Image (cartoon, rainbow, N blue to C red):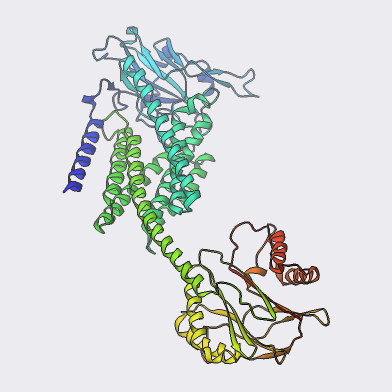
Amino acid sequence: MERSYVKRILFVLLSMFCFGSCFDSLLPYKSVKWSQGWEYRFLTEEEITYFQPAIEDLSLDYQPYHIPYVSLEKPMPKFLSARIRFRDPLGYAESSLLLRGLVTFFDAYCGDVKLQSEFFYTPPSDPLIGEGVITYNRNFIPILQLPKECLGRNLYIVFFSEGILPLGFSEPPLYGDPTHHHKAIANRTQAFASLGFLFLILGLFSFYLFERRRKKQLLAFTWFSCTSGIHFLSQSGFFGFFYYDSILPSFIIFIFTLFLIPISCLYFFDQLIGSNRWNVIRMLWQFHVLFSIVILTLAFTETISMSMALVTFIWLCLPTLVIQIIVAWSQMAAKKPKAILLVIGASALFILNAHDILSSLGILDSVPRSSHWGFFIFVICLTLYGENLFRNSEIKYGTLQKEIVTAARIQNAILPPSPPRWEPMDINVYYQPSHEVGGDFYDFQALGGKRFGILIADVVGHGLGASIIASLSKFAFFQHYKHWSNPSFLLSAMNEDLVKKSFGRFTTATYFHIDLESKKFMVSSAGHPSFFHWKSESKELVEIKPKGKPLGILSGLTYGEEEYPFKPGDQFLFFTDGLTEEENADRLEYGEKRLAKSFLETIAKDPIDPMAKLLEDFHYFTGLAGAPHDDITIIHLHVKA
């Protein structure tokens, strides 16, 4: 009941906002429409130099001007004169004209009186050699004061295009009280600057969260929010940074961010809710990327006019916004939590942008601009919806972390708590998983009669999945305890169990059986890395690598056994591939050769803690400070003399 009540309030407020933004009767000024008397004609550079309103009054070349002017032709003319006869003051004692949008003009006249200059034009000394110099008027305010003497006369505005800038009006000018117009400029600048800063702050905060959580949705929102922030700041002129000398840099930023906003928005929408193979939102943002590249290339090479590029962009965005609403409703129909926020945001964005687009094209008779507020509502709704998803994911993440901690405790319980003390052998073990839980495991078994068994194994991959398979492998090892004295039979039996339970994940293993009475050891391997045997009598280091296929792939496999003699004083080093495959900053692997060299140096120095010396050399080469890229297990066995 409470949720339904909140929904109704939001819909009522949205309806009232849209109603208030679409009717001139609620506003303190009137607008002069392009359909009510504006005319235009193109000018040459020579006509610009000698432009005189009295002569222009006699010109019959003027045509009806529909604002904005859009041409499919290559934009060759760079100068345009627009005029309208000032017939009715509409009851204003003092009146003015507010020039909205991106307009670039030299002079505005009322009769022969110059009202305002945005740019000054200095003709070249030699027209055959150079071009005229254009200088920005730093005192310019886009409000034309209309004195009473203007009544009944033509009002002229001489436009020019600098590079790719649109020529002429981009929006209809507004006629009304000068005070109201100054307030409108201040309010617009403050609104766009505030929204720009808000979106930039949201983007920086989401990037901070991304650094902590590494979620693609947060990175997508960072891109979307920062692009939007830069776009709105560009419309407020970046507080004058670009407007003093040229309007072109600010316009280029405006255009690029304008085309990037739907791409980043759709990409964020895709990351937020997209999961299907035929994802409409994903196809839309990919199409927008291709469209933007093509249309901007054509516009910047002046193959088409920038006005035509903007109109094409607008008509593409409208169906995109409709599809966003449909997708939002589908989320609501699927009873996704807080999906109503998506519907409200997408609807507000569509309604208020459509209102501004139709107003600019003259289809809707309305003055105020509301698209930025639609954008604001859309971003806030997406933020709240994403926050709800992230909060739920954080709860699930916390629960998963607790389960992982429990799994880590269970895994530690199945590993020997400490190396065994078997006389006359000295055993050292080092174990470090790459995550909270790992896929390496090992075990030691005393078999009686001075016979001992050592198992070292490595499940492919790492993390929670590998740790589960490691637990199954350890269970298989204990289940077939009768074969602990027969390495080949043991690995064959373990393989049959793991083929049924490991679901394609294989395990490499080496089982080492040593008999102190006969001074011999037997070994069987299931695709595991080699191990080292240092012979104290000959001072020789031998690498032993028995052949065998990993466990858990194929059933019916048999494994061979290899038997070797040893002497008191001999040493053995067993390890998993996480040790030798660890890389340093130059992407060089530690490798078995470096490990063998380090093992020989350790034996030569005969330290109290040989494992510490081995790890010192390993960390010196790799520079490893945190967790390794793969699980690492090392077993050092010294048969004392």
In this view, the residue farthest toward the left is 1
Judge by depth and name the residue closer to the eye, 496 or 59. Answer: 496
Provide residue 138's location: percent of width, then percent of height. 51, 17
Would you say residue 72 is visible in this rendering? no
| Residue pictured at 62% horizontal, 21% vertical | 127
Above or below: residue 144 compared with residue 323 = above
Above or below: residue 603 compared with residue 568 = above
Judge by depth and name the residue closer to the eye, 564 or 65. Answer: 564
Would you say residue 578 is visible in this rendering? yes
96 with respect to 103 (left or right): left
Instruction: State the image quarter where residue 393 is shown.
Output: bottom left
Above or below: residue 128 compared with residue 546 = above
In this view, the residue farthest toward the top is 149
Instruction: State the image quarter where residue 312 is shown.
Output: top left
Provide residue 439's location: percent of width, then percent of height. 53, 72
| Residue pictured at 50% horizontal, 31% vertical | 250
Task: Count all numbered tags in the image, as a single digit.
Answer: 0
531 with respect to 296 (left or right): right
Provide residue 139's location: percent of width, then percent of height. 48, 15
302 with respect to 633 (left or right): left
Task: For the C terminus, give its image quadrant.
Answer: bottom right
Provide residue 121's location: percent of width, then percent of height. 54, 18
